Amino acid sequence: MTTLGSSDTWRRPGPTAEQRRADVFIGLAVTAVALFNLTLTASAGAFHLGPPPSWPEQAFWSLAITAPLAVRRRFPLVVGTVVSAAFIVAQVRAAPEMQLATGALFCAIYTAGAWAADHRRSRQVRAGVIGAIMAWLLLSIWLSIDSVPPDAFADAAGPVPPLLATIVNAVLVNALAFGFSYFFGEMSWVAARREHQLEVQAVQLRQARDEEGERAVMGERLRIARELHDVVAHHVSVMGVQAAASRRVMDKDPARARTALEAIEQSARTAVDELRRMLSLLRRGTGADEGPATVGIDRVETLLDGARDAGLTVRFGVFGAPVPLPDSLSQAAYRIVQESVTNTLKHAGAAAIDVRIRYLAQELEVESTDDGRGSRVDRPGTGLGLIGMRERVAAHDGSLETGPRPQGGFRVRARFPLAAHPACPAETAEAAV
């Protein structure tokens, strides 16, 4: 994933093709105007820096200062260095065109701060350029003091000595101008970095949203798989046991075989009803708004009737004072019992199953034990059954214990924390088997 990076390590991307084309047009335009202004300055005889060099040299210095702006955003540090060096030498040579040249210098310093990829290097270059120009300004003032005419300040009327006022004014104006070019270049770079950070954060948010969506889809798939396993596996297991019993007694005891077939029919109808319910939920949405559960802890006894019909000896007990349960918790407890019965029918070879529901002071405890082959490795725990039970219990911050009992058989015990309510003492004699 892309990281934001620090202000010193982030490198501003170069200009786009459109920006490079705009720089070329602007650079050519400024150069043309600078040459035109040079013509006007020479024609007016405005040679404030002293006798000018030849016309070709004057044109050369105007080109050297303004033409590099055509590539100012592609090579900002190079342009800033070249323009400032040409500006100083042009003043040394008394080139008369300084209006456009000064503007080009400020633009070059600004661009070096705004567009240089290495911002630390940009600060060093700009500080060096501004320092060199200010040093040349002070040197030129010092060299020209002796040539100031005695009557140069004849009209001076202020409280500050005129020569000092002139020097301070020149230094102050140039310092402010270069300071602004440095400041605005810095602000432009900071704005570009912030825009980059916003773009990176937007990408990260989109990635996080996509990942969250994938997790939601995976969670929904697991929920559907768990529901399908609980519904189909239980009823198919019961139907399989009943079919086997019907086949064995078909000739000897037709009435018993008919009873088994009726149980198979009822199990099939129940399975189809629950599958229809699931499909209806899927059509409505993701299942976040499922409404009241169609199965719950109050239907455990009906569930065990099917186990009795399948040939198991069933013992069932409810201990403690029942309290109202949330639909999701009630359904989870029902599914735990359902999965336990299913595994007993499929894997245990058991003759009896004992199911107990205990309403304790702070917990709901659901326990299922059988007298089958509890040591078999394929008792619940290696397939979707145990995974589904653990997920249901974990969803309610409960705990699950599964495993063979020392005296034989297999135990499944789930505990769900309950909201605070009056104590519901369970029969302590039944607390363990």
Image (cartoon, rainbow, N blue to C red):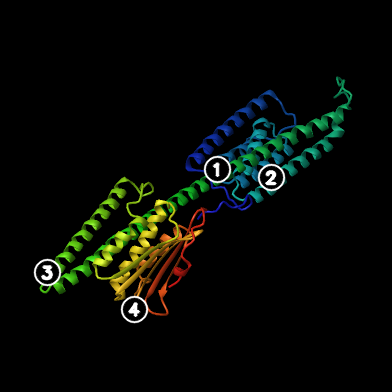
Q: Are marks 2 and 3 in contact (CB under 8 Å)?
A: no
Q: Which residue is mark 2?
A: 126
**Residue beneath label 3, please?**
254
Residue appearing at x 55%, y 43% in the figure: 195
Q: Position of residue 289 (x, y in %)?
A: 37, 46
The residue tagged with tag 2: helix, strand or loop? Answer: helix
Task: Give x and y (percent) for residue 261.
Answer: 16, 64
Coordinates of residue 92 in the picture (x, y in percent): 74, 39
- Residue marked by disc 4: 373
Find the distance from the CA under tag 4 to the CA under tag 1: 67 Å
Earlier residue among tags 2 and 3: 2
Q: Nearer the viewer, residue 18 or 105?
A: 18
From what the image shows, is residue 327 above or below residue 43? below
Q: CA distance from mark 1 to mark 3?
A: 82 Å
**342 left or right, relative to 404:** left
Q: Which residue is mark 1?
A: 195
Instruction: Tell me whether the residue at label 1 lies in contact with that at label 3, contact meaning CB atoms closer than 8 angstroms.
Output: no
